[in-house]
Amino acid sequence: MARTSKRGKVYEALHGGTKFDGLKEPFEERDPIVLALNSLALGVVARKRKADQRWGLDRLAELVSEETRLKYWRQIHRCRLAYQSRDVESYRSAVGGMMRAYDALEREAESGGAEPLHEDVLEGQREDGSVFAVAANADSAWAYSQQRVEVDVWTLDELAVILAAPVFTQAIRLKRAMPGTEVMSVIQPEDVGPVFTGDTESGYVMSDKELEAMKRVGEEGRKAGK
Protein backbone atom coordinates (compact mmCIF):
# COMPACT_ATOMS: atom_id res chain seq x y z
CA MET A 1 0.00 0.00 0.00
CA ALA A 2 2.71 2.45 0.94
CA ARG A 3 4.71 1.83 -2.23
CA THR A 4 1.72 2.33 -4.50
CA SER A 5 0.53 5.47 -2.73
CA LYS A 6 3.93 7.08 -2.60
CA ARG A 7 5.02 6.38 -6.13
CA GLY A 8 1.61 6.47 -7.76
CA LYS A 9 1.17 10.18 -7.18
CA VAL A 10 4.41 10.83 -9.00
CA TYR A 11 4.01 8.52 -11.98
CA GLU A 12 0.37 7.75 -12.63
CA ALA A 13 -0.19 10.66 -15.04
CA LEU A 14 2.42 9.24 -17.39
CA HIS A 15 0.68 5.95 -18.03
CA GLY A 16 -3.02 6.48 -17.58
CA GLY A 17 -3.43 6.03 -13.86
CA THR A 18 -2.65 2.35 -13.34
CA LYS A 19 -0.91 1.28 -10.13
CA PHE A 20 2.85 1.68 -10.35
CA ASP A 21 3.38 -1.67 -8.60
CA GLY A 22 1.53 -3.36 -11.43
CA LEU A 23 4.31 -2.35 -13.80
CA LYS A 24 6.80 -4.16 -11.61
CA GLU A 25 4.69 -7.33 -11.35
CA PRO A 26 3.89 -8.22 -14.99
CA PHE A 27 3.02 -11.83 -14.29
CA GLU A 28 0.05 -10.70 -12.23
CA GLU A 29 -1.44 -9.00 -15.30
CA ARG A 30 -3.59 -11.26 -17.51
CA ASP A 31 -4.71 -8.67 -20.06
CA PRO A 32 -2.17 -8.80 -22.96
CA ILE A 33 -2.95 -5.25 -24.04
CA VAL A 34 -2.39 -3.83 -20.56
CA LEU A 35 0.79 -5.89 -20.33
CA ALA A 36 2.08 -4.34 -23.58
CA LEU A 37 1.11 -0.84 -22.42
CA ASN A 38 2.80 -1.30 -19.06
CA SER A 39 5.96 -2.56 -20.73
CA LEU A 40 6.14 0.73 -22.62
CA ALA A 41 5.19 2.73 -19.54
CA LEU A 42 8.08 1.36 -17.53
CA GLY A 43 10.56 3.09 -19.84
CA VAL A 44 9.10 6.56 -19.38
CA VAL A 45 8.66 6.00 -15.65
CA ALA A 46 12.37 5.20 -15.41
CA ARG A 47 13.21 8.31 -17.46
CA LYS A 48 11.14 10.50 -15.15
CA ARG A 49 12.80 8.97 -12.11
CA LYS A 50 16.20 9.84 -13.56
CA ALA A 51 15.12 13.45 -14.10
CA ASP A 52 13.60 13.66 -10.62
CA GLN A 53 16.78 12.37 -9.02
CA ARG A 54 18.80 15.09 -10.72
CA TRP A 55 16.42 18.04 -10.53
CA GLY A 56 13.89 17.17 -7.80
CA LEU A 57 10.43 15.61 -7.82
CA ASP A 58 8.37 17.35 -10.52
CA ARG A 59 10.71 20.38 -10.34
CA LEU A 60 12.01 20.25 -13.92
CA ALA A 61 8.86 21.78 -15.43
CA GLU A 62 9.35 24.81 -13.17
CA LEU A 63 12.80 25.49 -14.66
CA VAL A 64 11.74 25.98 -18.28
CA SER A 65 9.73 28.51 -20.26
CA GLU A 66 5.96 28.61 -20.23
CA GLU A 67 5.90 27.45 -23.86
CA THR A 68 8.07 24.41 -23.16
CA ARG A 69 6.11 23.58 -20.02
CA LEU A 70 2.83 23.63 -21.97
CA LYS A 71 4.24 21.29 -24.63
CA TYR A 72 5.38 18.93 -21.86
CA TRP A 73 1.96 18.91 -20.21
CA ARG A 74 0.26 18.29 -23.55
CA GLN A 75 2.52 15.31 -24.14
CA ILE A 76 1.56 13.89 -20.75
CA HIS A 77 -2.10 14.28 -21.73
CA ARG A 78 -1.40 12.51 -25.02
CA CYS A 79 0.16 9.60 -23.10
CA ARG A 80 -2.82 9.36 -20.81
CA LEU A 81 -5.36 9.32 -23.64
CA ALA A 82 -3.41 6.70 -25.61
CA TYR A 83 -3.12 4.46 -22.56
CA GLN A 84 -6.79 4.77 -21.65
CA SER A 85 -7.82 4.03 -25.24
CA ARG A 86 -5.74 0.79 -25.09
CA ASP A 87 -4.01 1.71 -28.36
CA VAL A 88 -0.55 0.17 -28.08
CA GLU A 89 0.97 1.80 -31.17
CA SER A 90 -0.38 5.25 -30.28
CA TYR A 91 0.96 4.81 -26.79
CA ARG A 92 4.34 3.72 -28.14
CA SER A 93 4.50 6.95 -30.13
CA ALA A 94 3.38 9.02 -27.13
CA VAL A 95 5.97 7.42 -24.88
CA GLY A 96 8.68 8.19 -27.44
CA GLY A 97 7.50 11.79 -27.35
CA MET A 98 7.76 11.82 -23.56
CA MET A 99 11.34 10.58 -23.72
CA ARG A 100 12.23 13.40 -26.10
CA ALA A 101 10.33 15.85 -23.91
CA TYR A 102 12.50 15.04 -20.89
CA ASP A 103 15.62 15.52 -23.00
CA ALA A 104 14.32 18.92 -24.13
CA LEU A 105 13.38 19.96 -20.58
CA GLU A 106 16.84 19.11 -19.27
CA ARG A 107 18.60 20.93 -22.12
CA GLU A 108 16.57 24.07 -21.52
CA ALA A 109 17.06 23.93 -17.75
CA GLU A 110 20.81 23.60 -18.24
CA SER A 111 21.00 26.40 -20.82
CA GLY A 112 19.02 28.63 -18.46
CA GLY A 113 21.56 28.13 -15.70
CA ALA A 114 19.35 26.05 -13.41
CA GLU A 115 21.19 24.13 -10.72
CA PRO A 116 20.56 20.39 -10.17
CA LEU A 117 19.86 19.26 -6.64
CA HIS A 118 22.75 18.87 -4.26
CA GLU A 119 24.16 15.36 -4.67
CA ASP A 120 23.97 14.65 -0.93
CA VAL A 121 20.17 15.06 -0.84
CA LEU A 122 17.43 12.52 -1.59
CA GLU A 123 13.76 13.35 -2.06
CA GLY A 124 10.66 11.36 -1.16
CA GLN A 125 6.92 11.88 -1.30
CA ARG A 126 4.20 11.43 1.32
CA GLU A 127 0.79 9.96 0.64
CA ASP A 128 -0.69 13.46 0.36
CA GLY A 129 1.75 14.24 -2.47
CA SER A 130 3.95 16.64 -0.49
CA VAL A 131 7.70 16.31 -0.97
CA PHE A 132 10.31 15.94 1.77
CA ALA A 133 14.08 15.55 1.59
CA VAL A 134 16.89 13.91 3.55
CA ALA A 135 20.34 15.52 3.53
CA ALA A 136 23.66 14.05 4.58
CA ASN A 137 24.49 16.99 6.83
CA ALA A 138 23.43 20.49 7.84
CA ASP A 139 25.48 22.21 5.12
CA SER A 140 23.82 20.13 2.38
CA ALA A 141 20.41 20.77 3.95
CA TRP A 142 20.95 24.54 3.89
CA ALA A 143 22.15 24.55 0.26
CA TYR A 144 19.18 22.43 -0.79
CA SER A 145 16.69 24.63 1.07
CA GLN A 146 17.77 27.58 -1.06
CA GLN A 147 16.68 25.65 -4.15
CA ARG A 148 13.51 24.08 -2.79
CA VAL A 149 12.01 26.46 -0.23
CA GLU A 150 8.66 24.63 -0.31
CA VAL A 151 10.17 21.29 0.78
CA ASP A 152 10.96 20.30 4.37
CA VAL A 153 14.48 18.90 4.56
CA TRP A 154 15.85 16.65 7.31
CA THR A 155 19.42 15.69 8.12
CA LEU A 156 20.61 12.21 9.04
CA ASP A 157 21.33 13.48 12.56
CA GLU A 158 17.72 14.63 12.88
CA LEU A 159 16.43 11.25 11.69
CA ALA A 160 18.60 9.58 14.33
CA VAL A 161 16.86 11.69 17.00
CA ILE A 162 13.42 10.81 15.62
CA LEU A 163 14.16 7.09 15.37
CA ALA A 164 15.35 7.06 18.98
CA ALA A 165 11.75 7.70 20.08
CA PRO A 166 10.17 4.66 21.83
CA VAL A 167 7.45 4.37 19.20
CA PHE A 168 10.07 3.27 16.64
CA THR A 169 11.68 0.60 18.82
CA GLN A 170 9.50 -2.19 17.46
CA ALA A 171 10.19 -1.15 13.86
CA ILE A 172 13.95 -1.14 14.47
CA ARG A 173 13.78 -4.62 15.98
CA LEU A 174 11.82 -5.95 13.01
CA LYS A 175 14.10 -4.38 10.42
CA ARG A 176 17.16 -5.90 12.05
CA ALA A 177 15.55 -9.31 12.46
CA MET A 178 13.85 -9.42 9.05
CA PRO A 179 15.73 -7.43 6.38
CA GLY A 180 13.40 -5.95 3.78
CA THR A 181 10.60 -5.25 6.26
CA GLU A 182 8.79 -2.00 5.39
CA VAL A 183 7.05 0.51 7.64
CA MET A 184 3.49 0.89 6.36
CA SER A 185 2.07 3.09 9.15
CA VAL A 186 2.89 4.32 12.64
CA ILE A 187 0.70 3.47 15.64
CA GLN A 188 1.17 4.10 19.33
CA PRO A 189 2.78 1.37 21.49
CA GLU A 190 -0.30 1.10 23.71
CA ASP A 191 -2.30 0.00 20.67
CA VAL A 192 -0.21 -3.14 20.15
CA GLY A 193 0.89 -4.07 23.65
CA PRO A 194 4.07 -3.36 25.57
CA VAL A 195 7.31 -2.66 23.70
CA PHE A 196 10.84 -2.18 24.90
CA THR A 197 11.55 1.46 25.83
CA GLY A 198 15.10 1.21 27.16
CA ASP A 199 18.23 2.58 25.62
CA THR A 200 20.63 -0.36 25.32
CA GLU A 201 21.65 -2.09 22.10
CA SER A 202 20.41 -5.47 23.37
CA GLY A 203 16.89 -4.07 23.54
CA TYR A 204 16.68 -4.13 19.76
CA VAL A 205 17.31 -7.88 19.50
CA MET A 206 14.21 -10.01 18.96
CA SER A 207 13.84 -13.36 20.64
CA ASP A 208 13.42 -16.49 18.52
CA LYS A 209 9.82 -16.75 19.69
CA GLU A 210 9.04 -13.18 18.66
CA LEU A 211 10.75 -13.61 15.32
CA GLU A 212 8.82 -16.76 14.46
CA ALA A 213 5.56 -15.10 15.45
CA MET A 214 6.23 -12.12 13.18
CA LYS A 215 7.16 -14.37 10.28
CA ARG A 216 3.88 -16.25 10.67
CA VAL A 217 1.96 -12.98 10.62
CA GLY A 218 3.79 -11.95 7.43
CA GLU A 219 3.09 -15.26 5.71
CA GLU A 220 -0.59 -15.12 6.63
CA GLY A 221 -0.79 -11.58 5.29
CA ARG A 222 0.74 -12.58 1.96
CA LYS A 223 -1.65 -15.52 1.62
CA ALA A 224 -4.62 -13.29 2.37
CA GLY A 225 -3.52 -10.87 -0.32
CA LYS A 226 -3.46 -13.48 -3.06
Image: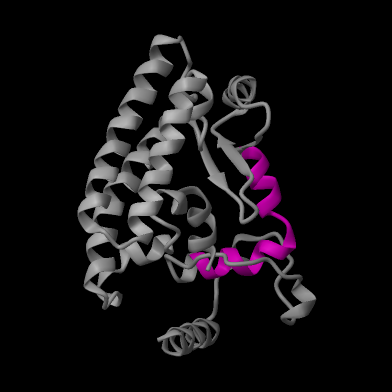
Question: Which span is picked out in magenta?
Answer: 157-175
The number of numbered badges drawn on the structure is 0
Residue 197 x %, y %: 74, 67
Residue 6 x %, y %: 53, 55
In screen coordinates, is 160 left or right of 95? right
**Nearest to the observer: residue 169 or residue 14:** 14
Q: Is residue 176 magenta?
A: no
Q: Main secondary structure of the magenta part?
A: helix
| Residue located 68% across and 31% down the image | 150
Residue 40 in view: yes
Q: Is residue 158 above or below residue 204?
A: above
**Nearest to the observer: residue 205 or residue 137:** 137
Q: Is residue 38 above or below residue 174?
A: above
In screen coordinates, is 214 left or right of 76? right
In screen coordinates, is 180 left or right of 174? left
Q: Is residue 174 magenta?
A: yes
| Residue located 67% across and 26% down the image | 149
Residue 191 location, quadrant: bottom right
Q: Residue furthest right?
A: 190
| Residue located 27% across and 47% down the image | 43
Residue 199 location, quadrant: bottom right
Residue 53 in view: no
Residue 142 x %, y %: 64, 22
Q: Which quarter of the rendered picture does the C terminus lie within? A: bottom left
| Residue located 60% across and 66% down the image | 171
Q: How is the image coloured?
A: one colour
Q: Is residue 226 above or below residue 127?
A: below
Residue 33 x %, y %: 24, 68
**Nearest to the observer: residue 140 or residue 165:** 140
